[in-house]
Image: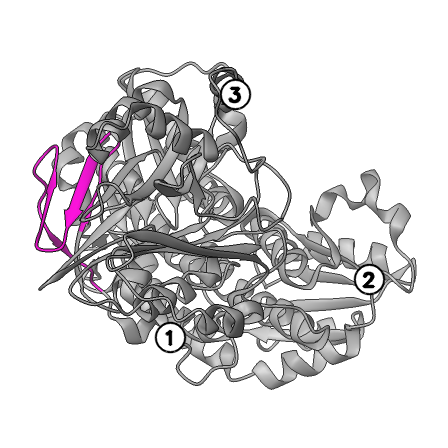
Amino acid sequence: MCGIVGYIGKSRDVRIGLSALKRLEYRGYDSWGTCVYDPERKEIFYFKRVGKIDDSIEEFEKLNLSGNPFLFHCRWATHGGVTNENAHPHFDCTKNIFLVHNGIIENYKELKEKLIKEGHKFTSETDTEVMCHLIEKYFKGNLEEAVRKMIKDIRGAYAIAIISKKDPQKIVAARFSSPLLLGINKDEFLVASDPSAILIRTRQVINLDDGEIAILKPDDFFILKEKPIQLIEWDIKEAEKGGYPHFMLKEIFEEPEAIENAIRGRLMIEEGNVKLGGLESVKEKLKKIKKIILIACGTSFYAAKIGEIMFQEYGGIDAQAEIASEFRYKKHILDEKTCAIFISQSGETADTLGVLREIKKKGVLCLGITNVVGSSQARETDAGVYTRSGPEIAVASTKAFLGQVAVLTMMTVFFGRQREMSLVMGKKIVSELSKIPNLAREILKEAQKIENLAKKYKDFKNFFFIGRKYNFPIALEGALKLKEISYLHAEGIAGGELKHGALALIDENFPTIAICPSDSVYDKMISNIQEIKARGGPVIAIATEGNEEIKKIVDDVIYIPKTLEMLTPMLAVIPLHLFAYYMAVLLGKDVDKPRNLAKSVTVE
C-alpha cells in the first residue's frame, strides 16, 4: 500500500526518482523518503519526512543530492506511527544497508527481539527495519547473497529494493505477495511497485514472481529465473490529468470509454454470443461447471454482487459473491464442478490473492477479471479476461468498476450460451450492451445538474442509498464512494430492509438516494420511497427517462436512459460517482487521495 521507485544507470539526476514517485502519490501515503549513493564520497545520503512530497520539497532540493543508484519511497503507516523515523528508507546499525519495503513482515517481533539480544540498535517502530539488520548480519561483501539469506528468515508479504555502500554498483530487489516490476531501458534500469512510475522512462517491463530476486547493475540485470519482457499497453498520457482538476473526475468521464474498451472486439451480435479469448483454453471445462463463486473486495465485490444476479438469472448457473477477507476463514464445499472468479482492479489485492492460492490447492478452476496485465492475479489464475480500462489513478475506483461489470455481463452470455440461453436472448443482451457507452455519454452531459444537486445537499451529514435486485449493489457502491472521498456517513441498504430498522433514522435531515429505474422491482421501490416520505425524509431518485410520475413523490430526480434491467447498474452508478465527487470538492476534501486509504491494498 506504498510506493517504491529505484534507479540505476548513467544518470545521476535524482529528479528522475522524484518524478516517478510523484506518479505514485495516488496510492495514498503519509510520509516519503529517499537514499542516494554518492560515488565520490562513497556514502549513502538519505532524506525522509512526514507529509506530502510538496510539503518538504524545498528542504529536499537544498541538499542538492546527486548520485546513483538511488531509491525513493512513499509510506502508508501500518507498523508504528507517522514519524520521520518510521518513514522509509530504513537502514542498519552501520548505515551500510538501505532498504524500502511494501508489505508486512509477520514475524518481525520475534526477529527484532533476537537481533536486539545480538546487539543491533533499532531506530524505528517498523517491521521493515528488521530486514535491514538481518542483511547486516549476513553481509560479507555481496549484497544479493545477504538478501537471499535474509528472505529465508522472514514471513509475510514484501516487495523490497536495497542498496549498499559497501557493494554499491547494484540494486537488489525481491518480492513475495506484493507487486514489483523492473523497467528495462537503454543504459538504465528501474524498479517500481507500479507501472505508472516506470513509464516516465520506458514501456518495457518485467514482472517479478513470488520468491524471485533481481540484481540490477548500471549496464546489466539478472534474475534467478529468466523472465520475458512485456510491453505496458497504455502510455504516460493516460496517467495524467489531461486538463481535469482531479484524476477522479477524468476517470468518471472516461467511464463510457472504459465500457467500450471492455467490449471492443468481443461482441458477436448476430450470433448472440461473445468472444472471450482469455477463456478459450478452459471452454470445455466451463461447460461442466455447476456453481460459480465470485470473490473480491470493496468496489470489486459490488461488481461481483451484480455478476451473481446475472449468472443466476441469465447464465443458467448457481452463483454467489463472497468477500475475500471473509471467505478465507469460512469452511466451503468445493469440487471439480465449482468455478471461482476473482475480481480485482490491480490484480494484487492481498485478500483476494490469498483465497486464490488457497483454493487452487483444492483443484478448483480459477478465472480472473483484472485491469493489470502481468499482475499476480493474471499470472496465477487458470484463465481470465482483462477489463482494459487503462490506468486508474484516483484511489476511489470508478471506471474500473464499469469495466468489471461489462466483463461480467459478457461472461454471463458466455456461460448462458453454453447452457440454455436462447439465440434471441443472447442477441438482445449483446446488442443492448453495445449501446451502453453512448448512453453513458448522455448521462455525463447532465454533470452540471448533478453538481447543482451536490450544492443543495452538501450541508447534510447522513445519507441512505437504497436499491433492489441489480441496483442494491449500486446502492452499496454509491454509499461507499460518498464515504471514501467526502467523509460523510452513508449507508447502502436493500430497499426492502428499511422497515426492519433503518427507518428509525429517517427525518428531514436524513436524505435518501433511491435507485429506481423502470424495471421488475420498480413498484416495490416506489413503496420504499413512500415509507421515507411519510417520515419527512428528502429523496433523490435515479429514474428512467420519461418517468414524469416520480416527480410527484420525490424531491429531486436524476434521469438515466432506458436499457435492459440487467444493464441498468452501468448507467445508474454514473450519477452517483459524479454526486460523490462534487460533494467532496464542495467540502474541500482531497478527492484523489482520501485519508487513511490506498489504491492497491496489498496487505491483509
Quarter-of-image position of residue 177: top left
Tell me the amino acid under the disc marked 1.
Glu
Q: Earlier in the sequence, mark 1 or mark 2?
A: 1
Tell me the amino acid under the disc marked 3.
Ile
Number of the front mark, 3 or 1: 3
Secondary structure found at label 2: loop
Residue 58: x %, y % from top left: 52, 75
Secondary structure found at label 1: loop
Residue at screen point 26% across, 32% down: 210
Q: How far apart are labels 1 and 2 at the CA level?
A: 33 Å
* Residue 64 or residue 144, whichever sits in front: 64
Residue at which label 2 appears: 461
State whether residue 291 appears in this view: no
Is residue 472 on the magenta stretch? no
Tell me the amino acid under the disc marked 2.
Lys
Residue 180: x %, y % from top left: 29, 45
Residue at screen point 82% across, 45% down: 502
State whether residue 579 appears in this view: yes
| Magenta stretch bounds | 206-233
Q: Earlier in the sequence, mark 3 or mark 1?
A: 3
Quarter-of-image position of residue 208: top left
Residue 474: x %, y % from top left: 57, 54
- Tag 1–tag 2 contact (CB < 8 Å): no
Label 3 neighbour load within 10 Å: few <14, some 14-19, many 20+: few
* Residue 474 or residue 461, whichever sits in front: 461
Number of the front mark, 2 or 3: 3
Residue 116, which numbered label? 3
Residue 240, which numbered label? 1
- Tag 3–tag 1 contact (CB < 8 Å): no
* Residue 28 or residue 223, whichever sits in front: 223
